[in-house]
């Protein structure tokens, strides 16, 4: 957990997500209640994203510079890490409701080159800095999600960059990644316990693995297999039950290509 020691240490990320799923609807409902322009209650999302980003940086700085540095709290606490999730909300808002902004940002080729360079620099901070570094604990987590935002935008707006010979192999790689992505939640949930017991169990019973590469191979493949199986046994049946209780037909969707901020 993110505020209290949990059964599995890595579940702090899931705790942050679950708290965000409670926080976000409340924020949107409050925004809807007090929005001056009822036809476009989402217009405040960019300002909310900026406010939350600044709040989290200040909050992490407080965890590091006030009293004894608490790097763990800066790393895992919801109020210190929710900015990354809300920045994803901002990108989703722009992509669906203000696509012209992203088109203007990403369509020129020179902008894409700059985006690649900026993303590489921002993500490099995670390699060169330790999470117990004061600068990284304050600003580094913001650099990471901004860097991956660049990667996401590049993947959305870059097309046809591979030759015909490379296109098919890369399509297979993409399909494999998409397949793993379907079960990524469960894979992440189970990778911790798999790493803790599966290599040792196989070594005691089969005499393998014996080296670091062997242990990693068992850990990697075991996480994929067990995570996928558990997803099929637990996650997707629950999702099907959810769809029966809350069918999609009862949800009123907003057309993403409609500018809800202006009347036609």
Image (tube, rainbow, N blue to C red):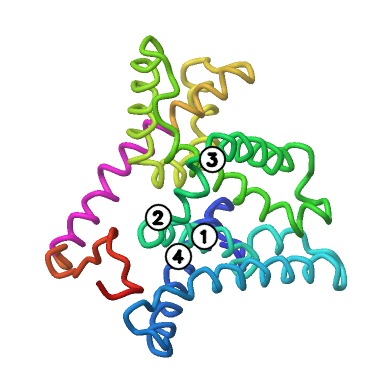
**Residue at image x 49%, y 24%?**
218
Q: Which residue is disc 3 drawn over? A: 151
Q: Sequence-wise, which precedes: disc 4 or disc 3?
A: 4
Crowding at mark 3 (Cα within 10 Å: few <14, some 14-19, many 20+): some
Residue 29 vertical placement versus 193 (above, below): below
Residue 8 vertical placement versus 107 (above, below): below
**Residue at image x 49%, y 44%?**
153
- Rendering quarter of residue 77: bottom right
Q: Which residue is disc 2 drawn over? A: 99
Q: Which residue is disc 1 drawn over? A: 85
Q: Quadrant of the N terminus?
A: bottom right
Secondary element at image label 3: helix
Q: Residue furthest front?
A: 264
**Are dots 2 and 4 in contact, CB under 8 Å?**
no
Calculate the distance from the C-alpha at mark 1 to the C-alpha at mark 4. 11 Å
**Residue at image x 54%, y 34%?**
109
Calculate the distance from the C-alpha at mark 1 to the C-alpha at mark 2. 20 Å
Q: Which of 183 and 199 lies nearest the eye of the viewer?
A: 183
Secondary element at image label 2: helix
Q: Which residue is disc 4 drawn over? A: 18
């Amino acid at each position: 957990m993110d505020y209290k020691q949990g059964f599995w240490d890595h579940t702090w990320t899931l705790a942050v997500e679950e708290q965000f799923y409670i926080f976000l609807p409340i924020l949107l409902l409050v925004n809807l209640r007090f929005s001056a322009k009822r036809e476009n209650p989402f217009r405040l999302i960019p300002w909310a994203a900026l406010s939350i980003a600044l709040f989290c940086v200040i909050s992490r700085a407080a965890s590091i510079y006030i009293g004894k540095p608490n790097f763990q709290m800066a790393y895992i606490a919801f109020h210190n890490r929710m900015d990354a999730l809300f920045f994803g909300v901002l990108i989703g808002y722009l992509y669906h409701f203000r696509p012209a902004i992203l088109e203007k940002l990403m369509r020129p080729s020179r902008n894409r080159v700059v985006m690649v360079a900026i993303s590489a620099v921002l993500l490099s901070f995670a390699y060169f800095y330790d999470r117990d570094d004061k600068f990284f604990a304050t600003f580094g987590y913001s650099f990471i999600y901004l860097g991956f935002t660049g990667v996401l935008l590049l993947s959305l707006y870059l097309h046809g960059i591979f030759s015909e010979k490379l296109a098919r192999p890369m399509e297979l790689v993409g399909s494999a990644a998409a397949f793993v992505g379907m079960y990524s939640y469960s894979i992440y949930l189970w990778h911790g316990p798999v790493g803790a017991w599966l290599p040792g169990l196989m070594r005691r019973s089969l005499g393998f693995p014996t080296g670091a590469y062997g242990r990693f191979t068992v850990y990697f493949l075991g996480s994929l297999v067990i995570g996928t199986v558990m997803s099929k046994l637990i996650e997707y049946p629950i999702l099907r039950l959810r769809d029966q209780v809350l069918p999609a037909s009862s949800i009123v969707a907003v057309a993403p290509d409609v500018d809800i901020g202006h009347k036609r």
